[in-house]
Amino acid sequence: MNSHHKSRSRSPHRPARSALSAVTAVSAVAALGLTLAGCGEKGTGTRDEGKSKTTASTDTKVLWLGDSIAGAQAPALGAALKASGVEFKDSSSDGGGTIVDSGEKITQMIAGDTWKRLAKDIESFRPTVVAYQVTTYDWGSQEQQRAAYERVVDTASNAGAEVVFVSPPPIRIDGFYKQHEAQMRTAPETAAEVAGKSGGTAAFFDASQVWGTDASAAKAQRAPDGIHNCQQGAAAFAKWFTGKLGKQESFTPASVDTWAQESWTGDERYGKLRCAV
């Protein structure tokens, strides 16, 4: 994992604060008309597999992949999906999380680890949906990006699963990312192209419907680093994603008030990101 990226996720912080109040969490999700943005650090307890005990089960099992941006969305996403009767496993990374080997040493290492973990997760969890949020490390040429995205579609298909590619939120592009800015912009486009040519085995969810396209918008929903989301953004994303997936997989998303008040809002990564509550 790249030390620079880790430093963004593990910056000095105040002790983790208490969970968002039920009113705050529900109100934040209800205000989906706002443009929200962000990403985050992995905490504890969100990798648990399972379904809600209070909701009828479905046959859908979601494996969630991505970098620490996806990691900050995972607590809310897991709560929303489990409340909807969907099994969920968070396999996002604290760091790069990419499946694209750009030829650079860092992406070779990260992609290698991601593919090994994916093989283990498919064998042990047996997902019906592999959801991959395009990462800030999906560098390389469009040919390299395309090869990786086609590979994950083939890998999932061979295991009897579909793939959902998700576009990432806009982030603040600083010196670390600047040299890869163009590649970061082509990655979602390439993933959408691969999904469109997959013959129905993959789909592309355009998350700009949640985040918008302006990295500086809705600052109250973002962590101070300008990259990660806080609880409100995670809740908005979870509601949107669960609704989209429910239509695709034919399950009924649970109402927001069944999951937005749960303990995920106090996940330690939000404290590390200095999210206001």
Image (cartoon, helix red, strand yellow):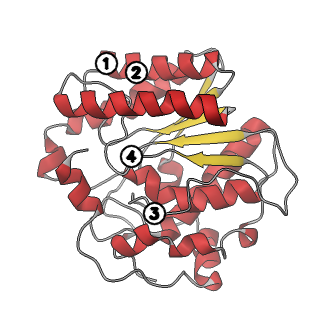
Residue at mark 4 to residue at mark 3: CA–CA distance: 13 Å
Q: Is any atom of residue 160 visible in this view? A: yes
The reply to whether the C-beta atoms of the residues labelled 4 and 2 are less than 8 Å apart is no
The reply to whether the C-beta atoms of the residues labelled 1 and 2 are less than 8 Å apart is yes
Residue at mark 1 to residue at mark 4: CA–CA distance: 18 Å
Mark 4 / mark 2, whichever is N-terminal = 4
Query: Callout 1: few (<14), some (14-19), or many (20+) C-alpha neighbours within 10 Å?
Result: some
Report which residue position mark 4 lands on: 67
Q: Is residue 269 above or below residue 71?
A: below
Amino acid identity at mark 3 = Gly
Amino acid identity at mark 2 = Ala
- The residue under the point 15% across, 44% down is 178
**Where residue 43 is drawn, which disc sits there?**
3
Report which residue position mark 1 lands on: 144
Mark 3 / mark 2, whichever is N-terminal = 3
- The residue under the point 69% across, 21% down is 160
Determine the secondary structure under disc 1: helix
- The residue under the point 50% across, 85% down is 18
Q: Residue 247's spot in the image, x, y percent?
A: 75, 41
- The residue under the point 70% across, 40% down is 61
Q: Is any atom of residue 196 visible in this view? A: no
Amino acid identity at mark 4 = Asp
Report which residue position mark 2 lands on: 148
Query: Callout 4: few (<14), some (14-19), or many (20+) C-alpha neighbours within 10 Å?
Result: many
Query: Callout 3: few (<14), some (14-19), or many (20+) C-alpha neighbours within 10 Å?
Result: many
Q: Which one is nearer the viewer's eye here, 74 or 189?
A: 74
Mark 4 / mark 3, whichever is N-terminal = 3
Residue at mark 3 to residue at mark 2: CA–CA distance: 28 Å
